[in-house]
Image (cartoon, helix red, strand yellow):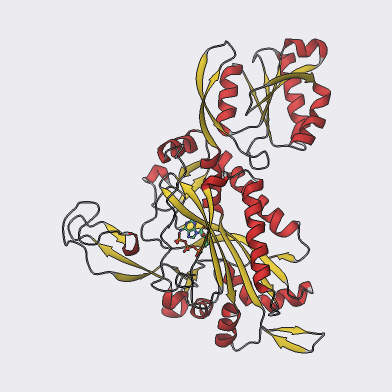
């Protein structure tokens, strides 16, 4: 959580990558193909909330699985966690969210539009209607969403929807290390929903009011190797983005200066992606010292320190945190994968195609299987049989009809492989496999598909 009055760093970099897509193209594709819809659209929508459609829900799940696999499953020193969204209100007193989780906002007295004060470059006139001296004085606005528990709506029942998942981990630190029999260095990870009453939601799913975070809280002893642990996690996160193919020129790890970090943090890195509107934060990695556990020990009066059997001493471990937004990361994969390119259709005609070059582990559909004709039962049956067999191990889809159109559609949703069953397949059991990026086609035996996709996907 940022300190009050502490704002995000302004970029110092001058070299910016080329923009390859507009947000209008992304939002149109997201809606057309069923990735992301505006929430409650039939009632006019609700600002700052989105729904994931059939492909988007799978895409986001794949992104979360990729994070989970790397951060939890591949490590013997990280355990899983899943805390409740609503916690005891004192949690947010201890964490500082009640007193300091503010943004400053101003309103235009003329056009009534509202702005985040720190997002304005010029405060002398309204950026929307242009009226001079029309902005109100900035005032604090707490970003936590309130709700009430139980039937009586008095102050005793006020509660908050969590603005971050991390606090659920901190207050359970002792429960977790004791039950999982872990000693620092070890981590606790969770993915879950968070809520913030953002003053100005916007940029599609980049800044929303209900979103998902993937957080790793890694506790280390104060033995002089804490900065090594910090550097290791930064490297691990760099590798993660690289291994799923995020273009390196559109990703940067911005090191926060001492002035930009909260006073208790020893180091901080913002992971930023170059979105169509400019650089935006995907994740923050921070060395938070003992700040969080100390705060909960102070307010709760409970001892959350680790007891080291070897030295028979209690100590408060230091904390390395990696906090990534899963909606922003999903949006990043969608934007980063997007490409428009000239291609040649099966009849030799030059056309343009839109292709999402998703990594196979991220792609919502991995293999599409087509029957060349709709009304030929033996073709349909064979294609459906192939799809059913591949479905056991891969994310597949069956479709039929005009092959050119089917390829176009699968390119647009980022499917790495298409398999076509045609009349020849009935005679010799061969099929055509077409690869998304190169558009190369090869003829292979249907019996070889399982093995081929097992290796390539
Ligand atoms: P910002 O400065 O963009 O408001 P933040 O610094 O407040 O973000 P953190 O508190 O560090 O964000 O949260 C960790 C991560 O959670 C962010 O890097 C981002 O990916 C995600 N996140 C935070 N706020 C939102 C939001 N309103 N919508 C979507 N994702 C968010």
At 22% from the left and 66% from the top, the residue drawn is 136
**Position of residue 80 in the picture relative to residue 83 (left or right):** right
Camera-nearest residue between 75 and 408? 75
In the image, residue 33 above or below residue 206? above
Quadrant the C terminus occupies: top right
In the image, residue 313 above or below residue 128? below
- In the current view of this chain or complex, which residue is farthest to the front? 14
**Position of residue 42 in the picture relative to residue 328 (left or right):** left
* Place of residue 339 in the rendered image (x, y in percent of width and height, measured from the top left): 52, 33
At 79% from the left and 20% from the top, the residue drawn is 444
Query: Can residue 82 be seen in this snapshot?
Result: no
Query: Can residue 379 be seen in this snapshot?
Result: yes
* Place of residue 382 in the rendered image (x, y in percent of width and height, measured from the top left): 76, 19
Camera-nearest residue between 189 and 242? 242
In the image, residue 357 above or below residue 97? above
In the image, residue 384 above or below residue 273? above
* Place of residue 247 in the rendered image (x, y in percent of width and height, measured from the top left): 57, 43
At 81% from the left and 16% from the top, the residue drawn is 429
**Position of residue 92 in the picture relative to residue 443 (left or right):** left
Number of numbered discs overlaid on the protein picture: 0
């Amino acid at each position: 959580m940022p300190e009050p009055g502490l704002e995000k760093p302004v970029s110092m970099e001058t070299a910016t990558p080329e923009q390859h897509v507009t947000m209008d193209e992304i939002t149109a594709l997201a809606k057309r193909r069923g990735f992301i819809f505006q929430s409650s659209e039939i009632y006019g929508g609700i600002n700052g909330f989105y729904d994931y459609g059939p492909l988007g829900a799978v895409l986001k799940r794949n992104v979360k699985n990729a994070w989970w696999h790397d951060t939890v499953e591949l490590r013997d020193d990280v355990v899983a966690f899943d805390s409740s969204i609503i916690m005891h209100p004192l949690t947010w007193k201890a964490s500082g969210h009640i007193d300091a989780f503010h943004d400053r906002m101003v309103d235009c007295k003329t056009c009534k539009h509202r702005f985040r004060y720190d997002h304005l470059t010029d405060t002398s006139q309204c950026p929307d209607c242009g009226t001079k001296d029309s902005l109100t004085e900035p005032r604090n606005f707490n970003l936590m969403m309130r709700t009430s528990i139980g039937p009586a709506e008095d102050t005793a029942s006020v509660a908050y929807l969590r603005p971050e998942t991390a606090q659920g981990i901190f207050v359970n630190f002792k429960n977790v290390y004791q039950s999982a029999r872990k000693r620092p260095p070890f981590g606790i990870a969770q993915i879950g929903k968070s809520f913030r009453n953002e003053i100005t939601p916007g940029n599609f799913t980049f800044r929303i009011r209900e979103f998902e975070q993937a957080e790793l809280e890694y506790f280390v002893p104060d033995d002089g190797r804490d900065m090594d642990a910090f550097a290791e996690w930064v490297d691990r996160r760099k590798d993660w983005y690289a291994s799923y193919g995020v273009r390196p020129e559109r990703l940067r790890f911005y090191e926060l200066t001492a002035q930009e970090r909260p006073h208790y943090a020893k180091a901080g890195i913002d992971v930023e992606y170059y979105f169509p509107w400019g650089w935006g934060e995907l994740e923050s990695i921070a060395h938070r010292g003992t700040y969080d556990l100390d705060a909960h020990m102070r307010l709760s009066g409970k001892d959350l320190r680790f007891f080291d059997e070897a030295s028979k001493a209690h100590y408060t471990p230091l904390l390395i945190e990696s906090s990534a937004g899963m909606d922003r990361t999903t949006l990043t994969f969608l934007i980063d994968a997007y490409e428009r390119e000239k291609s040649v259709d099966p009849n030799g005609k030059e056309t343009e195609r839109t292709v999402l070059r998703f990594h196979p582990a991220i792609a919502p559909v991995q293999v599409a299987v087509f029957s060349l004709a709709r009304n030929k039962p033996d073709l349909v049956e064979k294609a459906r049989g192939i799809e059913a067999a591949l479905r056991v191990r891969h994310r597949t889809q069956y479709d039929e009809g005009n092959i050119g159109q089917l390829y176009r559609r699968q390119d647009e949703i980022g499917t790495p492989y298409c398999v076509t069953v045609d009349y020849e397949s009935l005679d010799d059991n061969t099929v055509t496999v077409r690869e998304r990026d190169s558009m190369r086609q090869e003829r292979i035996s249907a019996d070889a598909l399982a093995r081929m996709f097992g290796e390539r996907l």
